[in-house]
Each structure stands twice: as C-alpha cells, then as structure tokens.
Amino acid sequence: MKYPRQLKLLLAATVLFAFQAAVTTYTNATFFEKYISESWVGLIYTLTSILTIVIVSYSNSIINKFGIRKTLLYALGLLLVGLGLVLYGTGSIVIVSGLMCYMLMSSFGFFLYDLLLEHYLTPTTTEHIRGLYLLAVNLGWLFAPSIAGFSTDKLGIESVYAISFVVVLTLFIVIHSNLRSIAHKPRPHTSIWKVMKKTWAKPALRSVMVINFTLQWFYVWMVIYMASYLRTVHELSSTNIGIIFTVM
C-alpha cells in the first residue's frame, strides 16, 4: 500500500514528537522538586491538565483562525519557549512556568498530530494508518526513558531538556519546510458538554470512557511519583530507572 510522501513525513515527525515528550516525562516531577516543595508538584500537574482541557475545548476556534499547520507550528514555538525558560530562565516562578508551558504544549501537540492524520484517512485505510500512527508514537517512547536516565546521570537533569529542545527545533524546521500543502478544513464548533452527553448516553462508548479514565488515573500517579519513589526509597540510579521504564 502506497502512502503520500507527506504522510510518511508526518509519521516520522510523530516518532520525534513522541520521543521529545517521553524523554522528559519521568524527569518533570523531579525537576519541579528543585524549585517547589514536593506537596505542590501534584497541584502543578492538576493546573497544567486544567489548562490543557481549556485549550483543547477552544481548539476549533484556534485552528479555524490559523489553520492546522500554523497552529502546530505555534505549539512547537511555544514548546521551544518553555524549554528555553527551563534551560536559561532565572527564578523559580519563571522556570516552573516554562516547564508548565512545555507540558501543556506537548499534550496539545499530540492532539494536533491526531487531527493532521485525519487529512489522510479514508474508509479503507483508517485502521491501517491509525495502527501506523500508534506504532510511531510507541517507537518514540521506546528508548527515551533509557536515554533520559543515562543523560541525567552523566550530564545532569537539565541535559534532558536540552535534548528535547534540539528535537523540537528539528521538528519545527521540518514541518515548516515540508508540510505546506496540507489544506485547511474548517471545523464546526462543537460543545464539549454536548459531546459528553451523547457519549455518555451510549453504553459501549461510556464503558470505553470509564476504562480510559481509570487507566489515565493510574498512569498519572506512575508518571509523577514512581521515578521519585525508586530514586529516594530504593536508591536506584537514573540510568537503572530509565532501563526499568524502557522495559515497561
């Protein structure tokens, strides 16, 4: 089955985007603890998640104004700004805000990549292309924890964000130069509450939503606290923790 060059490029970009998100996922909580008390870390994650929900709920208006390609480029630009503040900012407020911006735009970026993928879906190729997309995401996640753990031990935790910065900058250049022909398809505004009501009214979809919520609840505990637990309680090195997460 032949696919357009831009779809292949999009899938390759997805691998890189997933990698840049995964390489920092298990270090974010530890990095936050350098600047705020441990009791505030969970609240920061909660606030970032709320802001993500707000942005996604207004995504139609944003995308209809700028187009999907420009919206993704703006998101990548804000990712670079956030990482720049993490690496070069001074003061706890600036650095924590930069990391929150980075986490927020990473989540929004995955949403935008999924929308970009819709441009290439047809009734006969949807399952195959979405399978390739999930493969690309998981390839990006595969070795990132090991690389992050090794880099943290050898060069310090800031090096992880430097790696992410280089990857995001590469993505920005590639997408700016190569995805120009994606046509913008206006998206009608849909109330998130109406969607939730319709979804909840269908037992099969409701069950999927509940299962997914439960899984995400588990994942967020793992992401925030597991690395810190293994480091502080069991005194494992960052390299060993990265290997554990890669095997997982």
Image (cartoon, rainbow, N blue to C red):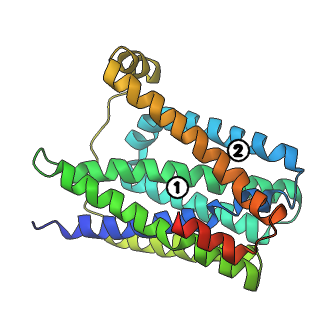
Position of 117 with respect to 1 (left or right) is right
Residue at horizontal 74%, vertical 86%?
154
Q: Residue at x 56, y 35 (%)?
A: 53
Q: 222 or 87: which is nearer to us?
A: 222
Q: Residue furthest front?
A: 234
In the image, residue 93 above or below residue 200: below
- Counting from the top left corner in percent of width and height, residue 96 is at 79, 55
Label 2 neighbour load within 10 Å: few <14, some 14-19, many 20+? some
**Crowdedness near tag 1: few (<14), some (14–19) or many (≥20) residues, C-alpha within 10 Å:** many
Q: Is residue 111 left or right of residue 129?
A: right
For the point 32% across and 24% down, the residue is 204
Circle 2: residue type: Tyr
- Report x, y in % for residue 72: 45, 55
Give the residue displayed 35% in from the left and 57% down from the top: 134
Report x, y in % for residue 51. Answer: 63, 38
Which residue is denoted by mark 2 in the rendering?
Answer: 45
Q: In the picture provided, is 157 more to the left or to the right than 194? A: right
Position of residue 130 in the picture relative to residue 55 (left or right): left
Secondary structure under the numbered disc 2 in the rendered image: helix
Q: Nearer the viewer, mark 2 or mark 1?
A: 2
Q: Nearer the viewer, residue 231 or 51?
A: 231
Q: Is residue 186 visible?
A: yes
Q: Is residue 58 visible?
A: no
- Quarter of the N terminus within the rendering: bottom left
Q: Residue furthest bottom?
A: 154
Q: Which residue is mark 1?
A: 75
